[in-house]
Amino acid sequence: MQFITHGPDIPDALLQAHEERRVVFFCGAGISYPAGLPGFKGLVEQIYRLNGTALSDIERDAFDRGQFDATLDLLERRLPGQRLAVRRALAQALKPNLRRRAPPIRTRLC
């Protein structure tokens, strides 16, 4: 099965083993880029945009230090709807572009 056009073809048997919890995939931090998904910093920025809010001073401090998980935790505590509002934005921000063409192998390995 190919998740990205012209991307790697993952054997069905391997996907089935994953479904049965017999295999775990360990992927690097850049795995999301070919599908057009943001890195953690960009994801946090999108969640703020989708919730129509800006970083508070304390959230900005955490964000500027690269503490993106803490930034989202602070946002969850501040927003009406709290965790649910952030999770909905997260689900929306993490919809991959499955039609996006995978980059050449030399790009992915660099």
Image: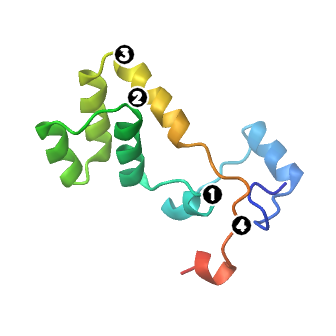
Whether label 4 touches label 3, CB < 8 Å: no
Whether label 1 touches label 4, CB < 8 Å: no
Query: Label 1 sits on what residue type?
Result: Ala
Query: Label 3 sits on what residue type?
Result: Gly
Q: Which mark is residue 100?
A: none
Q: Which residue is mark 4?
A: 101
Whole-Å distance between the Cαs marked 1 and 4? 8 Å
Residue visible at 85% across and 54% down in the picture: 1
Q: Which residue is mark 2?
A: 86
Residue 89 percent location from the top left of the image: 46, 32
Q: Is residue 21 above or below residue 29?
A: above
- SS of the residue under disc 3: loop
Q: Which residue is mark 3?
A: 81
Residue visible at 42% across and 35% down in the picture: 50
Is disc 2 surrounded by few (<14), some (14 to 19) or many (20+) residues within 10 Å? many
Query: Label 4 sits on what residue type?
Result: Arg
Question: Is 71 positioned to the left or the right of 99 in the image?
Answer: left
Q: Quadrant of residue 57?
A: top left
Q: Quadrant of residue 86?
A: top left
Earlier in the chain: of badge 2 and badge 1, it is 1
